[in-house]
């Protein structure tokens, strides 16, 4: 295969853009998962807290304490997932900006790089 001058450099730039796009997509998926974990944990915390209060009103103190402890644990899980989401949102934004800048430098249209075969990247 005959290559034109600069083809190897352009292939390297395209490969780097492809990696950035992949990393940004991975960060976006992680962000969605972290947000979902936080949502589910908050829902479970609210449910356990409500059931704990009902158990306390029914005079089942030991059961109430267990449910309220579980509510606190779910709340902690939700807070941790929210912190993770903030970090992933920051990372995704940085990757997205870098990928967009590379796309502009390459003069490409759209938002996805052309997928190159491994032999084209060499």
Image (cartoon, helix red, strand yellow):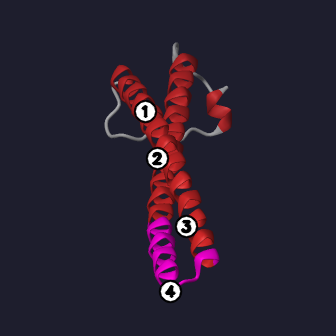
> Which quadrant does the C terminus fall into?
top right
Residue 36 seen from this side = yes
Q: Which mark is residue 68?
A: 3
109 w.r.t. 35: above or below: above
The label nearer to you, 3 versus 2, is 3
Q: Earlier in the sequence, mark 4 or mark 2?
A: 4
Magenta region includes residue 45 = yes
Which portion, as a residue range, is magenta? 43-62
Secondary structure at badge 4 equals: loop
Measured as percent of width and height from the top left, residue 100 is found at: 36, 29
Residue that badge 1 annotates: 90
Q: Residue at x 35, y 31 (%)?
A: 108
The CA distance from mark 3 to mark 4 is: 14 Å
Q: Earlier in the sequence, mark 1 or mark 3?
A: 3
Which residue is situated farthest in the bottom direction here? 58
> Which quadrant does the N terminus fall into?
top right
- Whether pointer 1 and pointer 2 mark residues with C-beta atoms closer than 8 Å, the reply is no
């Amino acid at each position: 295969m005959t290559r034109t001058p600069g083809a190897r450099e352009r292939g390297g730039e395209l490969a780097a853009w492809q990696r950035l796009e992949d990393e940004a997509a991975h960060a976006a998926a992680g962000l969605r998962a972290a947000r979902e974990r936080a949502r589910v944990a908050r829902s479970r915390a609210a449910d356990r807290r409500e059931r704990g209060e009902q158990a306390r009103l029914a005079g089942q103190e030991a059961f109430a304490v267990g449910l309220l402890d579980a509510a606190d644990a779910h709340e902690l899980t939700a807070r941790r997932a929210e912190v993770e989401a903030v970090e992933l949102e920051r990372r995704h934004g940085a990757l997205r900006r870098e990928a967009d800048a590379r796309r502009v430098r390459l003069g490409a249209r759209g938002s996805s790089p052309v997928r190159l075969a491994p032999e084209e990247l060499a």
